[in-house]
Image: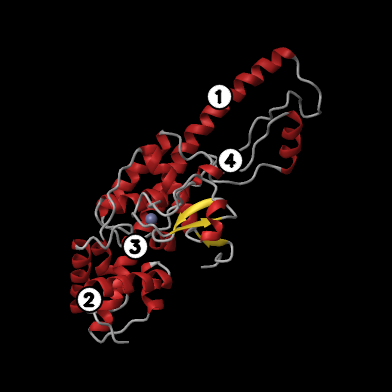
């Protein structure tokens, strides 16, 4: 992890008082995957799930619009440097606007009669601009969804479901202050879960134009606002894909599933991220079948840390009485 110095494990006793929220640090679970491996990112004052990448308390720093004018002076100053080009403005901020100043091209004040006309013009321009731009942005978002879904080889129903979620987000005005790409990617992430073909945030991020962190943050916000209730995924859901990513054969895969089932029966999986459990089970199975993959290799495919795999596999091996000879 790049930011390891800036991040501290939340379980560090020395830091337990410094927490920004009133979290019971030993019992906090990720609302998405149930993992208790949470990391506090002090730089951004965020709590991030180490297992699935979800940003849990983004309320502390909700990213608003990049640019805002609060009064006349600021408006003049900022309009001189020009508005930033951004997808969060419907038309990427590139269309010509009728000036907000009541002055003509020579800088003379415009008469009050003309000013009323100008006011009406501005009003209409705003409406037209919004409608055209909304359409165009929707088209862009849908093509983004298609591009990402086909890169991940996702079936048609997942794309359509994601498109519905995206439209709902637009209708509820949730795109404001966020990137289209970020909302589209999180709609796709949610849709995969809803359709029973979960993908990790890392996998979504690998085909997206935005970071895993931004997707995790946007997803958290959008799912809350849209009231999306997603069931935690089972570690078993991830086994086939992770195994094929590691070119492990069917018998290893079957063994990993068996290990997970036993772990679930003994309730060893609660409070554990499903991707970490899947990774650990695969790691164990690969050793048992003489197809040893390193913790690093498995961690990369599963999008978890080697530390997570180490902790999980020791737990599983011990509790299930599996002897591992390395
Ligand atoms: Zn999580």
* Comes first in the chain, label 3 or label 1: 1
Q: Which residue is mark 1?
A: 124
| Mark 2 in CB contact with mark 4 (< 8 angstroms) | no
- Pick whichever, 150 or 169, lies toward us: 169
SS state under label 3: loop
Q: Is mark 3 within 8 Å of ligand 1?
A: no
Q: Measure the C-alpha gap from mark 2 to mark 4.
A: 54 Å
Residue at 50% across, 46% down: 58
SS at badge 2: loop
Task: Please tell me which of labels 2 and 4 falls first in the chain.
Answer: 4
Name the disc covering residue 152, or none.
3
Looking at the rendered image, the disc whose residue lies closer to the viewer, 2 or 3, is 2
Q: Which residue is mark 2?
A: 321
Q: Is mark 2 within 8 Å of ligand 1?
A: no
Of residues 109 and 75, the one nearer the viewer is 75
State the residue in front, 187 or 270. 270
Q: Which is more foreground, mark 1 or mark 2?
A: 2
Image position, residue 265 (x, y; %): 18, 62
Q: Mark 4 or 3 closer to N-term?
A: 4
Disc on res. 139: none
Tell me the CA gap for discs 3 and 1.
42 Å
Which residue is farthest top? 113
Q: Residues within 10 Å of mark 1 (few under 14, many from 20)?
A: few
The residue beneath circle 4 is 65
The image quadrant of residue 150 is: bottom left
Mark 4: few, some, or many residues within 10 Å (few <14, many ≥20)?
few
In this rendering, the answer to whether 84 lies above or below 305 is above
Residue drawn at the location 26% of the way across and 53% of the way down? 156
Ligand 1 location (quadrant): bottom left
């Amino acid at each position: 992890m790049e930011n390891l110095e800036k991040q501290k494990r939340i379980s560090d006793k020395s830091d337990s008082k410094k927490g920004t929220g009133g979290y019971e640090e030993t019992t906090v679970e990720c609302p998405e995957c149930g993992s208790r491996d949470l990391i506090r990112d002090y730089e951004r004052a965020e709590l991030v799930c180490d297992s699935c990448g979800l940003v849990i308390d983004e309320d502390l720093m909700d990213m608003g619009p990049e640019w805002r004018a609060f009064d006349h002076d600021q408006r003049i100053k900022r309009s001189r440097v020009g508005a930033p080009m951004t997808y969060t403005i419907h038309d990427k901020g590139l269309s010509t606007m009728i000036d907000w100043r009541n002055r003509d091209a020579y800088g003379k004040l415009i008469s009050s009669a003309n000013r009323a006309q100008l006011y009406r013009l501005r009003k209409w321009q705003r409406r037209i601009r919004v409608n055209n731009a909304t359409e165009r942005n929707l088209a862009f978002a849908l093509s983004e969804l298609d591009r990402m879904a086909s890169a991940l080889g996702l079936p048609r129903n997942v794309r359509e479901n994601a498109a519905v979620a995206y439209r709902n987000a637009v209708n509820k005005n949730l795109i404001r202050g966020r990137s289209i790409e970020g909302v589209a990617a999180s709609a796709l992430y949610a849709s995969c879960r809803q359709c029973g073909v979960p993908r990790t945030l890392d996998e979504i991020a690998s085909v997206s134009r935005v970071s895993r962190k931004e997707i995790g943050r946007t997803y958290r916000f959008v799912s809350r606002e849209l009231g999306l209730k997603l069931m935690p995924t089972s570690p078993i859901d991830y086994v086939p894909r992770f195994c094929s990513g590691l070119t492990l054969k069917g018998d290893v895969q079957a063994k990993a599933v068996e290990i997970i089932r036993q772990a679930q029966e003994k309730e060893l999986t609660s409070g554990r991220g499903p991707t970490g459990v899947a990774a650990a089970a695969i790691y164990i199975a690969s050793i048992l079948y003489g197809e040893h993959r390193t913790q690093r290799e498995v961690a990369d495919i599963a999008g978890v840390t080697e530390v997570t795999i180490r902790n999980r596999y020791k737990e599983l091996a011990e509790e299930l009485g599996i002897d591992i000879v390395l």
